[in-house]
Amino acid sequence: MNKSIYHEGWIDLNKNGKLDPYENSKLPVEKRIDDLLSRMNVNEKTAQLVTLYGYGAVLTDQQPTTTWPDSIWKDGMANIDEQLDGRKDVPSDLYWPPSIHAQALNNIQRFFIEQTRLGIPVDFTTEGIRGLKAVKATSFPDEIGQGSTWDPDLIHQIGKVEGEEARALGYTNVYSPELDVSRDPRWGRVLSTYGEDPYLVSTLGVAMVKGLQGEHVVSTVKHFAVYSVPKGGRDGHNRTDPQVTPREVYTMHLPPFEAAMKADALGVMSSYNDYNGIPVTGSYYFLTRLLRQKYGFKGYIVTDSGALRFIHDKHHVQKDYKGAVLQALEAGVNVRTDFQNPSVFLAPLREAIANSEIPMSTVDQRVREVMNVKYWLGLFDNPYVDTSQSNQNVNKPSSEELSLRAAKESLVLLKNSNTVLPLDKNKIKSILVAGPNAVMEESLNRYGPTRIKVTSVLNGIKNEVSKETKVTFVKGVDVVDENFPVSDILDTPLSNNEKEQIQQAVAAAKQSDAAVLVVGEDDRTVGESRSRVSLNLPGHQLELVKAVVETGVPTVVVLMNGRPLTINWIDKHAAAILEAWYPGAKTGDAIAKTLFGEYNPGGKLPVTFPKSVGQVPLNFPYMPASQSYFPDDPEDFAQVTGPLYPFGYGLSYTRFEFSDLQIAPLKQNTGGTVQVSLTVKNTGKRKGDEVVQLYIHEKVTPVIVPASQLRGFKRITLEPGETQIVQFQLTPEDVQLLNQNMEWEVVPGTFEVMIGSSSVDIKLRGEFVITGSATNKAYGM
């Protein structure tokens, strides 16, 4: 340690023995950055525009070595990504305990502070979609499960836990939340989104941003923009040609990002895809005109891994990699991320600067934006982690309690015939647990905590019932068959082993009082680059379900999946269905407590479940008549209509009554707000949660608008017989539309208010009128 550079209240970062402006915490940040930029040479500036991937990816060292002073990062780095995050198959003694991990990152930071010329600190980044991506960090449901909670307060608390654990471990920037709006269930990454509705995604996304940044950790939102709708939902190496109109871009895909910018998110990840023929990572319109100039973004933009080179080698709008580098920087990209040595990026950029192919003012501006974030983080003044607090702040008891709460709140009851649920532990003496996901004990591989132990559904049930209850497990079949994914389009006969296993399940079911079948998807069928052409249960899982259901034993199907599935046979014949998604480490605990009635499920679907993949796209919100029902004469149209389960749907073990809708004022001008309230009563015999949902629709508009739009929701908990007044406020932003000139405008007219427990199950209706002159703000396209 070079103790001579550390002084009370400041660090002599450039080792010149005096307090320089960029080292002076009492000066405005802009003046500090001005001074720093004036001291930086070209190599130091360009080094602040690139990521170094961590140990096991690009970096071959866990800790600084004697070779580092001669490495490409001797001039600094913008960030080091996923350093010591528990990468699969990469062993290390520095992962755990947290204090050791934090000290390891301190050692790396010390290299940049003490052994680079200007001592510019590095930003330590990692993922955080379902908990922080670090060894034994607190585990939470995937974002689709978090979306099913409809609980912004819960999401905010999840963000706080992720932020606290990030800081304790030495990370300063978390790539979360994912704000993509999942409009096509064939797409593989539905599981890591909050859902299909922009209002829901915006509300939960803002809660996560504020939770993370409230712990003084940067929230880097992703993937900007129009990423979630590649043609045909095809992911993998495609991720191109999104099939959406400019109006859909503004009304469906951009609102969550604009909301995050209003919440002061300081990080944005640019996406792989193009829009309207222009790669987004090379689009000045998206990255500068929209993100910075209109939305007011003040942080730095990092590319998704490989997105910059795709400008050249996938989209082919530049003849070489250097051209891609220049287009991205001029568009607004700050930091290139890729699984390549930083020199791959730095060499052509430095050559371009030497040849005057890019203005130095552009480079300076990109560096300034990175420095602004590092100063916000306090890295120039307090670059190291206090390791004495690390062990007590990672996976602490209160965080584990929150993990269980999140897992329970994420569960959605889809069917409950004859109130078969909850199961009565006192009456059930034997139970069959079957299906491949009943014994899933590992978390999904990407974007969350690593090396954690998941309580399986089987173990959760065993822990919940008495020792006298006989629990029989038969796997039955695997998630996929030996011919997957071809079997998604071509039926494959059961193997002899599958036939034998299914017969064992049938025999066990006949000797049981109830059966719980846990089926769905896993890493082989869902996730990044895991798009599908079918939404049926993969493999031969349906054959297992049919065989057990047909024994007549009361059968509960638990779905563990990452996208809506077409489960028509199960919906018609199974006694009960519980959608669990992937609840995280507390999977078995949450599901078992719900099956046996200790917890009453109250989650709601954040996505629409179609009846057939042929209906896709089928989602909410939607334009009038685009998803019409034809209940009177369906044969005339030769088509299946309507969803299997609509957006916002979810049942409970109790019942709720909605009454006394109040709207005030009934007439309001275009700049005013409207108050909406109602009374909700639990009329059943169990404590339970209800998500009260507010939808609106303007009756006559200058352009076509969705049939209804979500504009408010509140999750409430009521004891039996308890009532609660639920209140909403509609602002001008809630009632605006995108007019003929692509301008946001509040158009005077009559608005219908619909209050329900789903987008279809509307309990109360009312109206109010907006008067006066139209108000608008221009966006243009």
Image: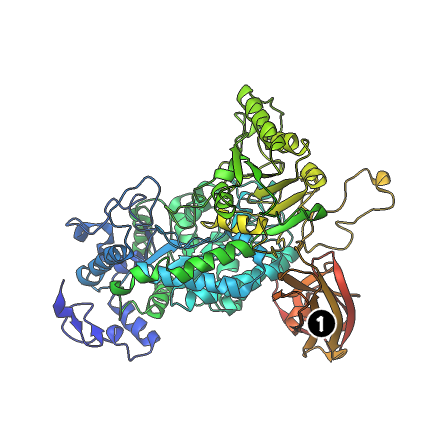
Please, is residue 203 above or below residue 499 in the view?
Answer: below
Which residue is tagged 1? 678
* Residue 1 placement: quadrant: bottom left
On screen, residue 95 versus residue 398, left or right, reads left
On screen, residue 329 versus residue 550, left or right, reads left
Q: Position of residue 110 (x, y in %)?
A: 21, 60
Foreground of the two, 240 or 320: 240
* Residue 159 placement: quadrant: bottom left
Please, is residue 400 above or below residue 724 in the view?
Answer: above
Q: Position of residue 700 (x, y in %)?
A: 80, 66
The answer to whether residue 781 is visible is no
The answer to whether residue 211 is visible is yes
Foreground of the two, 356 or 722: 722
Q: Position of residue 27 (x, y in %)?
A: 30, 79
Which amino acid, by three-letter code, is at mark 1?
Leu
Q: Secondary structure at mark 1?
A: strand
Q: Give the residue at x 23% y 58%.
A: 103
